[in-house]
Image (cartoon, helix red, strand yellow):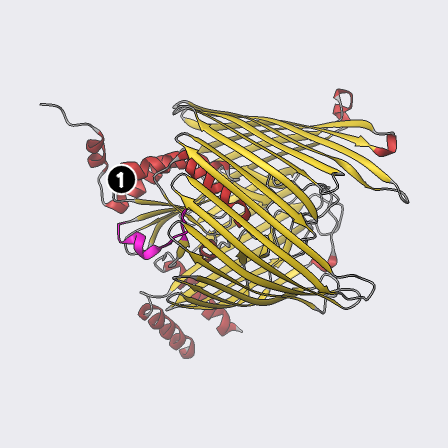
Amino acid sequence: MRQILVIWLLLCAGLLMAQTTLQVNGLNEAQLVYRDVPDSLRMYFKDSFSFNLAYKGFGFGMKFITELPKYRSSQSDLLDELEAKELKVGFDELYVSYENGPWMVKSGTLYETFGSGMVFRSYEDKEFDQDHRIKGFQLKYDDLFRLKAIYGGISSPNDANALDLSYGVDLEYPGSFYKVAAGAVGFRNKTAFGYDQSEVYFARLGFNYESFSLWSEAAMRELYHRGSAALKPVSGKAFIAGADYSLGPVLMGAAFKDYDQFQYRQQDVFLANYHGETLADSQASALDEQGVQGWIGWDISDNWSVEANYAEAWTSDDLRKMNDLFAAVEYSGDALNAGFEWSHVEKTGSEPGGVGKLSHYWQKEVTPALHLGFDVCSKPLSLKTEFKLVDKENINTNYETVSHYEPRIQADLALGKVSLSVASGSNWKDFGSLMDSRYWANAEAKIGLFDHSDLIVFAGSEAGGKVCRNGMCRFVAPFSGLRVELSTRF
Amino acid sequence: MKRILIILGIMLVAAFVWADQMPDFRLPDMNDKNVSLESLLEKGPVLIDFWADYCKPCKEAMPHLNTLAEKYEDLTVVLISIDKAKDQQRAKSYLKKNNFKFVTLFDVDQTLAKKLNVSIPPHTFFVNTEGEIVYSHKGFDPTLVEVYEEQVQLLLDIKAEDSLEAEIPEEVE
């Protein structure tokens, strides 16, 4: 008992003495989940505890996750299968760092981007539940010039006991209205036959003067060592550029991309279209694609604004093509906010089918959406409705076009400390099959408990993806059931 | 084991009663010039709002935050984008088009966002001149406009009546 008292006193004294310099920030997110799936583990508990501490230049951070079981979130089907290897308990993030003036060194889980991310990015993709974070060392200098250096590894997808290595340097000089940068990155990846070794050299240029800005990035890649003698070295290149100009209430811009054999894991390429769409669903980005994008936005008056964004992309042999359009008109008044949006994504081309044959494919997604915001009994109500139409040619039925519709409606009501959101969606082929179609319906309540805590209760089913409701936007996995979530920040 | 649990308990309790401090940061602005928390606090209290281009509620909040920035000269409103580097240009275009009176910063690797455990935008922090977080809120809906204004007045030590008087134009004699 005396020992505990001494520890108490020492801790309190230590914390009080350090009060002016010690910084503590943390977050605990606890979830109780009842999942409507046909397996034995329907009810489970999930907790994520994040903690960051800074003291006189030293930093320490961690994120501990207890997730039993971890369901895959990339599956579009609501009835996800439980994968034993995905069970997760342990540290999701861990780092120590030290900062002194312009210098910073860090070791542990790293998040880093060189330029736009085209040549190097260490990140976690919550939308597709993919982890591309390397663990290693990082050095940064940020003053008259900016230096970033990294060295680290990540578990190889080809061998769980081996690491894929990444190392690189990015040096940038920021001038008064321009910036120039150059660097190199190396990758050593385990393969089924041995390892691949590649190097990427890059340069960047940015120019920003009053209403005009311009940026560009160029890189070349040499995959010079292959795991097998049967595989040949590969040379790749990438170039992206963009510019925009604002003329009073009008802003216009354009962008260009050209990728050739520039695809690898530790990158996140600029796709040059509004919806972030890939050129073809069956082809990795940056393998072979070129494209252009143009956009214009105009604030017509204090109340009205319009926006249009169009992009096209194609392969060097012109076998695959896509286009992407987004247009919106917004009204913002004292008593009413309203907007109409139109999204259009179309992909066509040919891909290897039978022996020596090419199969043609074509698909189109058109999504008109309308949103309204107004007060009902002095409480703000927001309504959003969209109606996605998907047309697809089916090669198994002699290229007959098959269509389906995905209507969705959502209403959000804010009542001070409590916010409510109800949504419903469906997936149906025609009016005749309405009763046999899949439906999603859900309700979510967000309750502000104390200054630092929020309670969120969700019931129903949802298709997953990026969801904005109750005034927040986040990526969610496909889900059906009941979820009670308590997040506390300190 | 029991001792470890007790120590952990004490640390947690201490963390809860601790003055919530905004971590020091230095982030690039629209023109790629670094802006630090220290330089912002020199001008007075700061309202920091984390946002992303894909987030509609974030964009709905901006005109209201801009009104606060215009109404209270001593308050600095800082918008920090947590968009990915490849989407940064789109975020910049949006801000350029709207010509808001904000300090706009970019946290592409979410270095500051992670220190504050911000993962869901919008997330708003009210920071006094000592660098302490006096109020924070996750999400945005129009009922918060009044709450935010109250918090700003508390930060600036302004009484509500003073604020109303400031809004009424002086009579011409």
According to the picture, the residue beneath numbered tag 1 turns out to be B72
Q: Secondary structure at mark 1?
A: loop
Of residue A344 and residue A29, the one placed in the foreground of this image is A344
Residue in front for this viewpoint, A266 or A40: A266
| Furthest residue in direction top, as rendered | A431
**Magenta stretch bounds:** B28-44
Check the picture and name the quadrant holding the C terminus of chain A.
Answer: bottom left
Above or below, A120 relative to A316: below
- Specify whether residue B38 is painted magenta: yes
- What is the total number of numbered labels drawn onto the structure image? 1
Residue located farthest toward the bottom when viewing the structure as drawn? A3
Give the quarter of the image for residue A164: bottom right
Q: Residue at x 41, y 29 (%)?
A: A249
Percent across and percent down for residue A194 are 77, 68
What amino acid type should be assigned to the residue bearing mark 1?
Tyr
Label 1 resides on the chain identified as B
Residue A253 image point, x, y percent? 51, 36
Give the percent coordinates (x, y) of residue A55: 39, 68
The residue most toward the left is: B173
Q: Is residue A425 visible?
A: yes
Q: Is residue A346 left or right of residue B171?
A: right
Quadrant location of the N terminus of chain A in the rendered image: bottom left
